[in-house]
Image (spheres, helix red, strand yellow):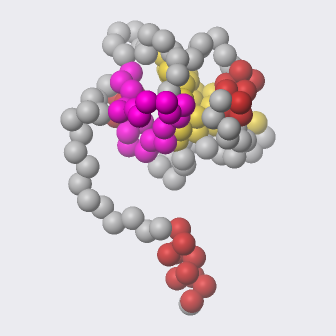
Amino acid sequence: MFCLTSSLQYYLYCKKTDMRNSFDGLSGIVTNQLHRNPMNGDVFIFINKRHNCIKMLRWEPGGFVLYYKRLETGTFEFPELEPGNESLQITWSSLMLMTEGISLKDIKRRKRFLLKNRDLSTQILSN
């Protein structure tokens, strides 16, 4: 309950969002603009025109949870976007850097091992 972790999928909506939207309005954007299911447990991120407010929508068992942060000074930085994209999948660490005000443009990621889900299921089935 009320949990955002690195195991979740995060999708940033790339267009300006009216922060007066709440659960129904934001889930409508997810369904109609992003063509995704807002009730699948993924986290959908929305930022306003001035880039000083962020909302995150997530379905948890029993209902939607809405996280909302307004900066008193400063702005949220968008990651590099490809033209024409309505959404961008981002990582948990990118979201944390973005909310903490750390520039994403100068970040260099070092190589890390990543276990793919199908590799894990193959290992489990073969044991």
Q: Which residue sits furthest bottom?
A: 127
The residue at 35%/33% (across/down) is: 80
Residue 65 shown left or right of residue 75 in the figure: right
In the rendered image, the vertical position of residue 39 relative to residue 45, given as above or below:
below
One can see residue 76 in this view = yes
The quadrant in which the C terminus is found is bottom right
Q: How many marks?
A: 0
The residue at 49%/42% (across/down) is: 89
In the rendered image, the vertical position of residue 11 relative to residue 33, given as above or below:
below
How far across and down, in percent of the image, does residue 125 sit? 60, 85
Task: Kindly indicate the quadrant of the structure image that contains residue 21.
Answer: top right
Q: Which residue sits furthest front?
A: 84
Residue 81 among magenta residues: yes
One can see residue 65 in this view = no
In the rendered image, the vertical position of residue 14 relative to residue 19, given as above or below:
below
Residue 83 shown left or right of residue 15 in the figure: left
Task: Kindly indicate the quadrant of the structure image that contains residue 92.
Answer: top left
The residue at 59%/14% (across/down) is: 19
How far across and down, in percent of the image, does residue 7 sit? 51, 53
Q: Which residue sits furthest right?
A: 62
Magenta residues, as a range? 76-95
Residue 41 among magenta residues: no
The residue at 29%/33% (across/down) is: 104
Residue 8 shown left or right of residue 101 in the figure: right
How far across and down, in percent of the image, does residue 126 sit? 57, 89
In the rendered image, the vertical position of residue 83 relative to residue 54, given as above or below:
below
Give the dominant element type of the magenta stretch: helix, strand or loop: loop
The quadrant in which the N terminus is found is top right
